[in-house]
Amino acid sequence: MDGGQERVDIAEAARRLGLTPDGVRKRVRRGTLPHVRQEGRIWVMLAADETPAETLSDTAKTGRDGADAVAADELRARVASLETELARTHEALRRAQEAEGEQRRIIAGLMQRLPELAAPSPSSTAPVESDGRAPPVPVGHVPDVPAPSPRRPWWRFWRP
């Protein structure tokens, strides 16, 4: 013990200060906690009657120096803009759902009218001779059937 200070290891310092051991290590690395390195170990120097608030500097206690305050303000502004964007997105979704519901109602109404709009029977559309037979097909008449496309080798798919 030097000058009212007590040398403790990182785990004990974390317990006394109400921090995690990683938090103590980072404060040692930043230099906000007094410490001593001996024989490859780190010893944190704490006053015997010291409370957690007295040990850390103001910046380390609050975590709010100038740069942190600016960053926090930027984050608040970003969160506000994201909340506004989320509200607009929710409104657009609500309108889209209403439009979809209206479309479904229209489709249901059309489906109910479908039997009324039934297509005429095929017998009334096909030409028929007076004796009930189909008219003869003229000689040389070729029905309109699309010609098959020539088959290409499989590798032409990659090279048109």
Image: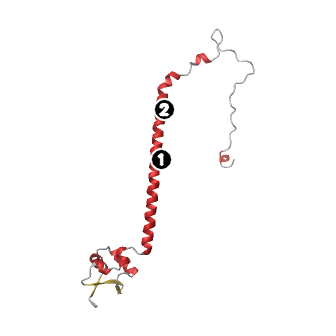
Q: Position of residue 68 (x, y in %)?
A: 42, 72
Badge 2: how crowded within 10 Å, few (<14), some, or many (20+)?
A: few
Badge 1: how crowded within 10 Å, few (<14), some, or many (20+)?
A: few
Q: Dot 1 lies on which element?
A: helix
Q: Which residue is mark 1?
A: 92
Q: Position of residue 137 (x, y in %)?
A: 70, 18
Quadrant showing the N terminus: bottom left
Using the image, determine if residue 93 lies above or below residue 57.
above
Using the image, determine if residue 126 lies above or below residue 160.
above
Q: Residue furthest right?
A: 140
Q: Name the amino acid, label 1.
A: Ala
Task: Name which residue lies at 69% across and 15% down.
Answer: 136
Q: Name the amino acid, label 2.
A: Ile
Using the image, determine if residue 111 lies above or below residue 99.
above
Q: Is residue 23 left or right of residue 130?
A: left
How many labels, in total? 2
Using the image, determine if residue 157 lies above or below residue 6.
above
Task: Name which residue lies at 39% across and 73% down.
Answer: 64
Instruction: Quote the CA–CA distance across marks 1 and 2.
Output: 21 Å
Q: Position of residue 77 (x, y in %)?
A: 45, 63
Quick one: label 1 or label 2, which is nearer the N terminus?
1
Q: Is residue 157 left or right of residue 19?
A: right
Q: Which residue is mark 2?
A: 106
Q: Nearer the viewer, residue 57 or 128?
A: 57
Q: How is the image coloured?
A: secondary structure
Contact (CB < 8 A) between labels 1 and 2?
no
Task: Name which residue lies at 66% across and 11% down.
Answer: 129
Q: Nearer the viewer, residue 14 or 122?
A: 14
